[in-house]
């Protein structure tokens, strides 16, 4: 059974005074198997962020279903949503979203604290994780004292520490320089190799080229998808670029 | 060249868009402006000069209190407007930065700011004056009734007050404008655009400040606990206040950080969902918050001390009148003993004959047209003696000696039976030891002209023997109805057989004064008639010698009415000022709290948004916000309450200066003030907390786009 199943997802926004309606997602259907590393690509306005918000249970679809482990997350009650998010999902954001008021360690602890875990358990979990991510020596620092790449690694640690079923990453390399981007993508690859399911939304061909599968979103629908199979990152990069070119031309034809 | 309407339009829009910050600011200008107008108008009120037959000080008190009030409100307005203005400007740096990035020069921005200030000045001053003029009548009624003066009719707008107030606020707003222009002139557009979003360093504990804080606060509290009497209290009060203020600032900024860091060290406590967010949040902004909280704490303390003190005095005034003016009229005659015998004439050495003096004074009242319905005489001696004590010669603190008959008249007890040379002791003073069992004293050198450089020449008085202790200790009645200086705890009181003994001691003492008082009631006369009666008795000079009364060195008559009007003029004016300033300061505290909540709301918005994404439920968020706000909000109030507890003894001692000696009453007034303040504070909390929630709890959908 697939870990995540999305079927017939539709989202229509109504502007504040009930005037124009904007269709962000028209009909999105796809599934993600356990242990997969999926990238979702698309231009601005293609519905990427809306899709991610619905998957994160931060927003509700107009119609359609999202099943995580066979459970419909659109049907979860408001009061249980927060617990659902912190127990099942891990988030990595473009601008890291670390809290300035906490040291890196406390930022990483945040979801565990919200779960009500004891300090002993938390410190037991963080040590191996920090070692793996190479931030052991930075744990007592504050976000504004470390580089962007280090902040993002701390954010990844925060996402991983709850052992989530699914990591949702929203443009994780968007605010990083090329070296830090490379390091982060390698890190994602390693994590995925250990069995962690990752769903990443991105603009970046380079980032998408690291994924096992790439979904292309256009006008609120899944337009195309690419499987890596046995290809290298470079080969994947070329294929994604070609697809994007075709998509752009097609877009022009449609218009 | 742009059209002339460009700046006014932009300025109006800017105020409208920032109304969340400008509205409270403008309301403050309106409020302080109204307060200022009222103070000026009361000060200039011509009504007070024609007021109060029999009061000498009514107008003087009003004028004095209003002058103090105007001064305090002026200083306060200045500090406060500058403070709120700087807050406003900080919130607006981004907007101004955007203007300059969009191609406006500093001159253009200055143009907008000039018009903004103009709008604020016009709106604030016009509405403020209107409010002030409306409330003026109400405040006049309040003040007059507090001072127990007949309420005047009519309603007037005081033009000089309008002008003074308008000019003062125009100047204030002009000053803040200059300050803002200077600030913009110095800044670079990019800096303006970035605004306040710079990561703050974690606050460090500054041990130096902790030590200074502990020492100052400890010192202030020590003074408050230590002061033995009212004289020390008045001398050290402002020192104590100063130390406590310093201590409060230091401790709020440093100790709070220390406490929070200690909490963070405690892992079991810290890593709980509820504490985790609030402790770190408070720690993060405590440095800046510390000053704000200390401000609130000090203002709260000030307001409560002012109101509770003036309220106690006012509430105790009836008692003060009853104690100090036990009858409608008191005539007092004095015979001083500390004249040098060589220089005084034989006439001046004639002792007062109390009964003759009483008859003479009564005859003067009869001539003036009224006889008292009841009355009595009181005689006492105020004296300083040199007493052999433990092998040395000590000068006793001022000693009061009254006759047995006077004691009976004052206390309502039977007159004690005493032989000549016997006395009763009213103890209660630390110096009572000098007079237990018996005493004699050194006869003054001035009395017999001896050379006292050689102790062999010392001559002592006869031995006075203690016959017992008074049933009444040195209580309020005796203390206030004799002239024992208010708050003089060192005084002792003896009761002796009669006038002759008073004179015997007076004549041989180092220095002393004999007092005679005739106390009369005129139940048949109204207050004004009594004042008129006394005026008629003093139309003709008294000739005591001719009437066989002896030599009266000083003679005067007081009425209860004038005393009452005096006391209420003072206490009423004082209470009015206390409440009035209390309200003005309170307004400031409310505004500080509001701005604090709103600005923190905007800072916390992002934090809570992130936490919500990571899995913080709305309920948990609310709970953690509440615990944080509650702590921050009620910490100043709790500290203020502690300050007041320590201050209580000082206030009691200061109140004895006004002859008020009622601990229960003062305690009730203080507790009442505290309770009312807490209620108002809690209401303000709920209102501003709601503003905070609204900002922080903004739906993610709204925040997103």
Image (cartoon, grey):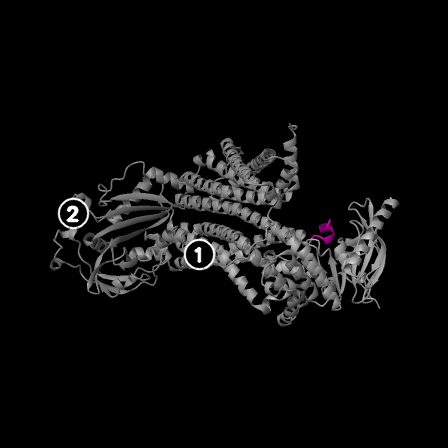
Closer mark to the observer between disc 1 and disc 2: 1
Q: In the picture shown, does residue A184 fall above or below A22?
A: below
Along the line of sight, the residue nearer the viewer: B96 or B298: B96
Q: How many other residues sit within 10 Å of disc 1, few (<14), some (14-19) or many (≥20)?
A: many
Q: Does residue A202 appear left or right of residue B203 in this picture?
A: right
Position in image of residue B484 (x %, y %):
32, 53
Position in image of residue B660 (x %, y %):
41, 53
Position in image of residue B182 (x %, y %):
53, 38
Along the line of sight, the residue nearer the viewer: B633 or A245: A245
Q: Residue furthest right?
A: A254
Residue shown at 33%/42% (left/top)?
B365
Residue B308 is a magenta residue: no
Total of numbered circles in the picture?
2
Question: Is residue B441 among what the camera can see?
Answer: yes
Name the residue beneath numbered marker 1: B647
Distance (Cα) linking label 1 and label 2: 49 Å
Position in image of residue A46 (x %, y %):
81, 51
Provide the residue span drawn in magenta: B698-705
Name the residue beneath numbered marker 2: B341
């Amino acid at each position: 059974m697939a870990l995540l199943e999305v079927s017939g997802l539709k989202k229509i926004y109504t502007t504040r005074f009930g005037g124009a309606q904007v269709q962000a997602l028209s009909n999105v259907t796809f599934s993600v198997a356990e242990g997969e590393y999926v990238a979702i690509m698309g231009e601005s306005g293609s519905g990427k962020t809306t899709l991610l918000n619905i998957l994160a249970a931060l927003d509700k679809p107009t119609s359609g279903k999202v099943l995580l482990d066979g459970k419909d997350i659109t049907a979860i009650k408001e009061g249980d949503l927060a617990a659902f998010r912190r127990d099942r999902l891990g988030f990595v954001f473009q601008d890291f979203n670390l809290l300035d008021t906490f040291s890196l360690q406390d930022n990483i602890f945040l979801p565990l604290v919200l779960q009500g875990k004891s300090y002993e358990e938390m410190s037991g979990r963080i040590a191996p994780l920090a070692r793996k991510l190479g931030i052991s020596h930075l744990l007592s620092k504050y976000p504004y004292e470390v580089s962007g790449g280090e902040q993002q690694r701390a954010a990844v640690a925060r996402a991983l520490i709850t052992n989530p079923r699914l990591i949702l990453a929203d443009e994780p390399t968007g605010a990083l320089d090329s070296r830090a981007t490379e390091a982060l993508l390698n890190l994602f690859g390693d994590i995925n190799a250990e069995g962690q399911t990752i769903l990443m939304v991105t603009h970046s061909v380079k980032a998408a080229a690291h994924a096992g599968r790439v979904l292309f979103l256009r006008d609120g629908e899944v337009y195309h998808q690419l499987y890596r199979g046995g290809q290298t990152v470079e080969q994947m990069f070329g294929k994604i670029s070609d697809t994007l070119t075709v998509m752009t031309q097609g877009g022009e034809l449609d218009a | 060249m742009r059209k002339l309407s460009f700046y006014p339009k932009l300025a109006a829009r800017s105020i409208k868009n920032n109304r969340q910050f400008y509205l409270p600011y403008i309301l403050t200008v309106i409020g302080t402006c109204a307060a200022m107008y009222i103070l000026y108008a009361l000060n200039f009120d011509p009504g007070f000069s024609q007021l109060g037959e029999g009061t000498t000080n009514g107008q003087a008190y009003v004028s004095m209190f209003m002058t103090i009030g105007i001064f305090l409100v002026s200083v306060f307005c200045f500090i406060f407007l500058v403070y709120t203005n700087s807050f406003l400007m900080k919130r607006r740096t981004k907007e101004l930065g955007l203007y300059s990035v969009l191609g406006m020069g500093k001159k253009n921005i200055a143009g907008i700011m000039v018009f903004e200030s103009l709008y604020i000045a016009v709106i604030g001053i016009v509405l403020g004056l209107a409010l002030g003029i409306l409330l003026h009548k109400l405040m006049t009624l309040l003040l007059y009734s507090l001072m127990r003066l007949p309420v005047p009719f009519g309603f007037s707008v005081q033009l000089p007050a309008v002008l003074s107030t308008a000019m003062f606020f125009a100047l204030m707003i002009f000053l803040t404008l200059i300050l803002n222009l200077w600030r913009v002139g110095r800044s670079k557009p990019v800096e303006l655009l970035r605004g306040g979003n710079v990561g703050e360093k974690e606050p460090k504990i500054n041990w130096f400040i902790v030590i200074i804080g502990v020492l100052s606060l400890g010192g202030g509290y020590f003074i408050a606990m230590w002061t033995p009497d009212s004289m020390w209290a008045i001398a050290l009060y402002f020192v104590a206040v100063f130390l406590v203020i310093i201590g409060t600032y230091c401790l709020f900024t440093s100790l709070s950080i220390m406490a929070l860091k200690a909490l963070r060290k405690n892992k079991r406590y810290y890593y709980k969902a509820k504490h985790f967010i609030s402790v770190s949040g408070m720690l993060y902004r405590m440095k800046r918050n510390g000053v704000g909280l200390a401000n609130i704490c000090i203002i709260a303390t000030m307001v409560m001390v002012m109101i509770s003190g003036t309220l106690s005095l006012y509430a105790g005034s009836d008692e003060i009148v009853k104690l100090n003016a036990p009858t409608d009229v008191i005539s007092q005659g004095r015979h001083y003993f500390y004249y040098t015998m060589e220089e005084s004439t034989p006439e001046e050495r004639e002792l007062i004959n109390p009964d003759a003096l009483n008859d003479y004074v009564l005859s003067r009242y009869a001539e003036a047209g009224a006889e008292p319905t009841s009355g009595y005489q009181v005689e006492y001696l105020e004296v300083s003696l040199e007493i052999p004590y433990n092998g040395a010669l000590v000068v006793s603190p001022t000693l009061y000696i009254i006759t047995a008959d006077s004691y009976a008249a004052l206390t309502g007890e039977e007159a004690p039976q005493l032989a000549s040379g016997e006395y009763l002791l009213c103890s209660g003073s630390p110096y009572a030891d000098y007079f237990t069992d018996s005493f004699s004293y050194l006869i003054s050198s001035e009395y017999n002209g001896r050379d006292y450089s050689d102790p062999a020449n010392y001559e002592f008085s006869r031995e006075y023997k203690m016959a017992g202790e008074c049933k009444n200790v040195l209580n309020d009645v005796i203390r206030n109805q004799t002239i024992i200086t208010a708050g003089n705890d060192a005084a002792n009181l003896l009761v002796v057989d009669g006038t002759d003994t008073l004179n015997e001691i007076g004549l041989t003492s180092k220095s002393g004064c004999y007092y005679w008082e005739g106390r009369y009631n005129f139940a048949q006369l109204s207050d004004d008639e009594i004042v008129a009666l006394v005026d008629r008795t003093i139309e003709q000079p008294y000739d005591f010698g001719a009437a066989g009364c002896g030599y009266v060195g000083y003679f005067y008559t007081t009425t209860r009415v004038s005393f009452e009007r005096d006391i209420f003029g003072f206490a009423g004016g004082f209470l009015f000022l206390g409440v009035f300033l209390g309200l003005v300061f309170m307004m400031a505290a409310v505004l500080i709290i509001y701005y604090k909540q709103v600005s923190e709301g905007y800072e916390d918005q992002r934090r809570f948004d992130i936490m919500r994404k990571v899995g913080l439920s709305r309920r948990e968020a609310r709970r953690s916000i509440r615990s944080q706000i509650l702590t921050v909000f009620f910490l100043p109030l709790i500290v203020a309450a502690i300050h007041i507890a320590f201050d209580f003894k000082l206030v009691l001692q200061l109140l004895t200066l006004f002859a008020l000696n009622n601990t229960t009453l003062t305690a009730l007034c203080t507790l009442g003030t505290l309770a009312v303040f807490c209620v108002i504070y809690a209401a303000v909390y709920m209102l501003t907390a709601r503003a905070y929630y609204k900002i922080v709890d903004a739906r993610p959908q709204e925040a997103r786009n």
